[in-house]
Amino acid sequence: MQNVLFKIAGLTASCLIAVGLYLRVDIINKGGPVMIPIILCSIFALAIFLERVMNIYKSKTDSTRFMEDITAALKRNRISEALQICEQTHGPVAHIIKAGIAKHDRSRHEIREAIEDAGLHEVPKLEKNLSALATIAHVSPLLGLLGTVTGMVNTFQIIQQKAQAMYPVDPSVLAKGIWEALITTVAGLIVAIPSFVAYNFLVAKVENLVVEMEILATDLVNILTQRK
C-alpha cells in the first residue's frame, strides 16, 4: 500500500504542477516560502484520501451472501469448505471469520478470543494513515497563519525602513503587503477544510466496517456454539 500511496502522491504532484504552470503560479509566489509546505500537505492529503478510499472499497464484502455460504457449510459440518470460502473472500471480515472457524472445536470464550485477536490485526490496517490526514487538517491552517504573520512582519519592516529614510508610505503598498500575507491563510484553510471533511468521512466508513465485523463475529460464535 505504501507504494500505491507514493504513486498516487507522484501523480497528484504532477497534476498540481501542471495546473500551477498553467496559472503561472503568481498567487503561490506571492504567498512566500510557507506556501511550499502547504502545497505538500495538499498533495499528501489527497494521496492519503484516495489510497484509503480504494483500500476501504476493497475491504468491503457482501456480508449477507458471505455469511449465508459460511452458515450453510457449517451446518453441513464442512469446516474445510467454510475455511476455503474465507480464503477466497478478500477483506478483514473474511479474515476474522476464518480465525473463528479455525477454533470451531473450542469453547465459546476461545472462539471469541481468536476473533478478537484477528480483529486487533485488521482494524489498524483500516485506520492506517488516518492520523496523518488528521494532522494535515490541523497543521495546514497553522502554516497559513505562520505565513500571514511572517508576511505582515516583512510588510511593517518595509514601512519602517521607508519611514526612517523619510520616504512617504504609500497606502497601496501597505494594502498589497497585507493581502499577499493573507494568501497563506486562505491556502491553509483551503487545504484544511477538505482534509477535515475527508478524515471524518473515512473514520465513519471505518467505524461502519468495524461494527459490521463485530456483528458478524457474534453471529459466527452463536452458530459454532449451537453446533455442539
Image (cartoon, grey):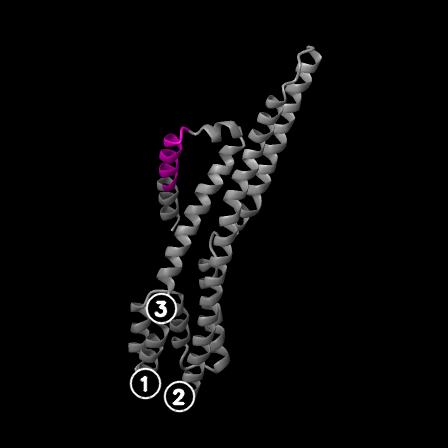
Task: Kindly report the distance in space between the C-alpha atoms of the residues bearing marks 1 and 2.
Answer: 9 Å
Which of the labelled discs sits on residue 179, or is there none? none
Task: Kindly report the distance in space between the C-alpha atoms of the residues bearing marks 2 and 3.
Answer: 25 Å
Residue type at mark 1: give it. Answer: Asn
**Tags 1 and 2 in contact by the CB under 8 Å rule?**
yes
Residue type at mark 3: give it. Answer: Thr
Give 99 or 201, whichever is nearer the viewer: 201
Quadrant (top left/top right/bottom left/bottom right) for the C terminus: bottom left
The kind of secondary structure element at disc 1 is loop
Residue at point 44% right, 84% down?
222
Mark found first going from the N terminus, 2 or 3: 3
Range of residues picked out in magenta: 12-24
The residue that mark 2 highlights is 227
Q: Is residue 56 left or right of residue 80?
A: right
The residue that mark 3 highlights is 61
Question: Height in image: 94 above or below 131?
Answer: below
Magenta stretch: dominant SS? helix
Which of the labelled discs sits on residue 77, or is there none? 1
The kind of secondary structure element at disc 2 is loop
Question: Height in image: 219 above or below 147?
Answer: below
Residue type at mark 2: give it. Answer: Arg
Q: Nearer the viewer, mark 1 or mark 3?
A: 3
Question: Height in image: 63 above or below 48?
Answer: below
Mark found first going from the N terminus, 1 or 3: 3
Measuring from the top left, give residue 125's x and y in whole percent: 44, 58
Q: Is residue 43 left or right of residue 152?
A: left
**Tags 2 and 3 in contact by the CB under 8 Å rule?**
no
Residue at point 48% right, 82% down?
108
Residue at point 37% right, 45% down?
8
Measuring from the top left, give residue 153's x and y in whole percent: 65, 26
Q: Quadrant of residue 59?
A: bottom left
